[in-house]
Amino acid sequence: MSINAANGALSWTPGEADGPGEFPVTVTVRDNGSPVQSASRVVRVIVREVNQAPVLAPISSKTAVVATTLVVSNSVTDADLPAQQFTFSLAPGAPRGARIDRTNGVFTWTPTAQFARTTNSVTVRVTDNGVPSSSASQTFAIVVGDYLEVRLGSSIVLAGQTGSVPVKVFTTVPATNASFVVEVPFGRLTNFSLVPPVLPLASASIQPLGGNRFQIRLGTQAGQNFAGEQVVSHLRFLALSNQPSAFVPLVVTNVSASQVNGQAVPRASGAQGRVVYLGAEPLLELVRDTNRTDLVIYGPKPDYTVERTPRLSPVAWTPFWSGLLANLHVMIPLTTTNQSGFFRAVEGGGLRFTAVGAPGANQEVSLTIAVTPGRTYEMQRSVNLVDWTSFATNTPSSNSMILRDVAAPGVKQRFYRAVGR
């Protein structure tokens, strides 16, 4: 701070550390008389804070790969004192799924297949907590590389019959061949093969690797290539007989592919397929998407009744839906209720549990079942709903039968089911 001795003009340029604040300044003036006389006054200088905008460091362009998370750190500085807090955000227009940590500014994005071979603009904003607040932004580009995906389809198959699922190839770059491994759980499907190759394929081979794993290689004819999304083959199989119904995943791993120029496709992966294996029992599945929820019934019989109970203790099964299946399944729209519920499917005119007697002193459980007279039923039990063991077979002469089972020592829970044969 300085003052002009001749005219008394006071001048001062406050620094960042001086505001906000109030400073008393004493100004004294003297004459040149004899004796010298003087006078003083105190001037209050009030320094108000002026919020300076933060400075966000430039962000260079980035490259990304489908199904791999891109991580970008951001750096911000601000001349304001005391130090301010910053909030990070993304401006509208960022690709779907992109995220930024509001506190530390770390940007993350895992591109899906739809973003392969695209360039995406992202604007990062940072805002301080000054009054009024100030902000800064930087825009950068993300280039997502080419991508190839092997996709297995789905199908429903009855025990003892043959079936197949489509083999699709989706690619954003022309490719001439693809190799991948299919893993299948034991116990339901066998005798895997591929249909004879047709355009664009020149070859289609499958080789057992052991452990129910199969190496599949697909090669295109000269002048042909994979482009866009194509059904290029079908994976055939035989469904084993006399197995409980189950959802069988077909897992795709170890995918690789070559471009027309001989170079590897930058990113290749697989999308698993599924086979709904139907033995004697029906299966239920809850399917959800953005706009609706459906209950899907799969079964080997033409008609079923779906029953619902709000709780499992005590059980109170009530009819929920009855109808015919088409192509071994049917979809039932559900209404959202925000309440829990349990469902079971009962074969039309088939069996259902009507009463369960709790274990007594001898640990015996009694099961009362409504059945179809003259039909054979196999009773099975499980402690985990996965591994089932048969413990009784009966062919009732009336529409009701009672079976008894003795609980094993130390077993806290046990599940039962009856399978019509």
Image (cartoon, helix red, strand yellow):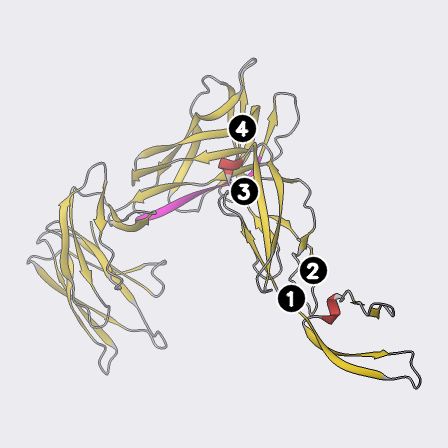
Which residue is identified by label 1?
A: 84
SS assignment at label 3: loop
Amino acid type, callout 2: Asp
Amino acid type, callout 3: Pro
Q: Residue furthest top?
A: 223
Q: x, y (%) of residue 40?
A: 79, 82
Amino acid type, callout 1: Gln
For image coordinates 52% across by 23% down, the residue present is 226
Q: x, y (%) of residue 401?
A: 12, 63
Q: Residue 289 vs residue 179: left or right?
A: left
Q: Residue furthest right?
A: 34
Which residue is identified by label 2?
A: 78
C-alpha gap between disc 2 and disc 4:
44 Å
For image coordinates 46% across by 16% down, the residue present is 199
For image coordinates 57% across by 39% down, the residue present is 121
Cβ–Cβ under 8 Å for marks 2 and 4: no
Q: Residue furthest bottom?
A: 35
Cβ–Cβ under 8 Å for marks 2 and 1: yes
Tell me which label, 2 or 1, sits earlier in the chain.
2
**Number of the front mark, 3 or 2:** 2
Which residue is identified by label 4?
A: 172
Question: Circle 2: is it few (<14), some (14-19), or many (20+) Cα within 10 Å?
Answer: some
Amino acid type, callout 4: Thr
C-alpha gap between disc 3 and disc 2:
33 Å
**Number of the front mark, 2 or 4:** 2
C-alpha gap between disc 2 and disc 1:
8 Å
Range drawn in magenta? 245-255
SS assignment at label 4: strand
Which residue is identified by label 3?
A: 111
